[in-house]
Image (cartoon, helix red, strand yellow):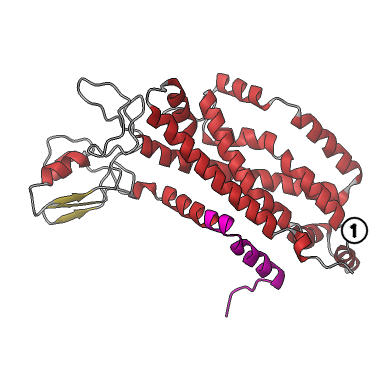
Amino acid sequence: MALFRLDPLTRKKIQRFKSIRRGYYSFVLFVILVLLATFAELWVNSRALVVHYNGEWYFPTYGAVIPGRTFGLDYDYETNYRDLKKRFSKDPDNFVILPPIPYNAYENDLRDGEYPPFPPSLEDRHYLGTDTTGRDVAARLIYGFRTAIYFSLILLFASYLIGVSIGAAMGYFGGLFDLLFQRVIEIWTNIPFLYVIMIVSSIMIPNFMTLILIIVFFGWTGMTWYMRTVTYKEKAREYVMAARALGASNSRIIFQHILPNTVSIIVTFVPFSVANGIIALTSLDYLGFGLPPPTPSWGELLAQGSSNLEALWIVSSVVITMTVILVMVTFVGEAIREAFDPKKYTTYE
């Protein structure tokens, strides 16, 4: 027996979403990309996946640092597994399995007598070339995507938690509470967000959580107006009056009755909020007010590419990747908006 059963209307909405092929397949592909980025160390990493040496098995990817002397090399720092693979190439008893992209997002792969950036090369396995300091562009793109998607999801959760709660309270209680928060939101939205970021960046080096806190501090107001309007409308419906007549508390009415009936509004805005979070982080990194170097970032790569247009592989990689991701998220958002449109499931008598 199923642990939970979806109501018929929800099943209709999900089926409607699946029928919109462009949005549905974009959603599936986007989820796959997020999962691949979550476990990026398994396929983009300078550490080996598996090392077999003298009858022993080693799995360095998620383990501790293994010094070179462990494998018979003459140094005590972490093993260079690309060189180790070359050393074992003529040894049938020992071998190294490297990820498809055998570079991490921070290491510099430099060459004697040449200066980066280096163009794409299958021989060196720099499939998208290197940046201006010799770091692999593909590795920084993938790890930059992981940073951006985690940033946008945490930002989404925090902003919606505050905005939905305050908006629902404004619409439900009304009166002085509603008027007070309307004035607060009007003042809040007039504060120049970029200037605040610039001031904070001049005082301290912003990190991942600092940027999230600042953006949430100014970004929670966006969802508040929508929730205020829809809650104000829902509280006049019969099911709310019936719940109040039965003695339900205000918190129970809001969280158990009103919010479940406004979930379509919340879900509709989620994909577009994810896209806005990615764009916000990329823009701040591009302007130099985002994550500190050498954190992998699309904005930092974009800044490098725009300053070195002769290395077209840098800027084109970032632009194409951003365009594909944002288009996919837009397709998902459009499909959800159409699938959860209440007019398609409403009968007027």
Question: What residue range appears in magenta?
Answer: 1-26
Q: Amino acid at mark 1?
A: Ala
Q: Label 1: which residue?
A: 236
Image location of residue 19, percent across then percent down: 60, 64
Q: Looking at the image, which is closer to me, 161 or 246?
A: 161
Does 18 appear above or below 326? below
Q: In the rendered image, which quarter contains the C terminus?
A: bottom right
Q: Main secondary structure of the magenta part?
A: helix
Image location of residue 22, percent across then percent down: 57, 55
| Circle 1: element type | loop
Image location of residue 28, percent across then percent down: 51, 57
Q: Is residue 21 magenta?
A: yes
Left or right: 103 in relation to 26:
left
Tell me if mark 1 has few (under 14), some (14-19) or many (20+) residues whose alpha carbon lies within 10 angstroms of its own: few
Does 300 appear above or below 43? above
Left or right: 191 in relation to 253:
left
Q: Looking at the image, which is closer to me, 216 or 6?
A: 6
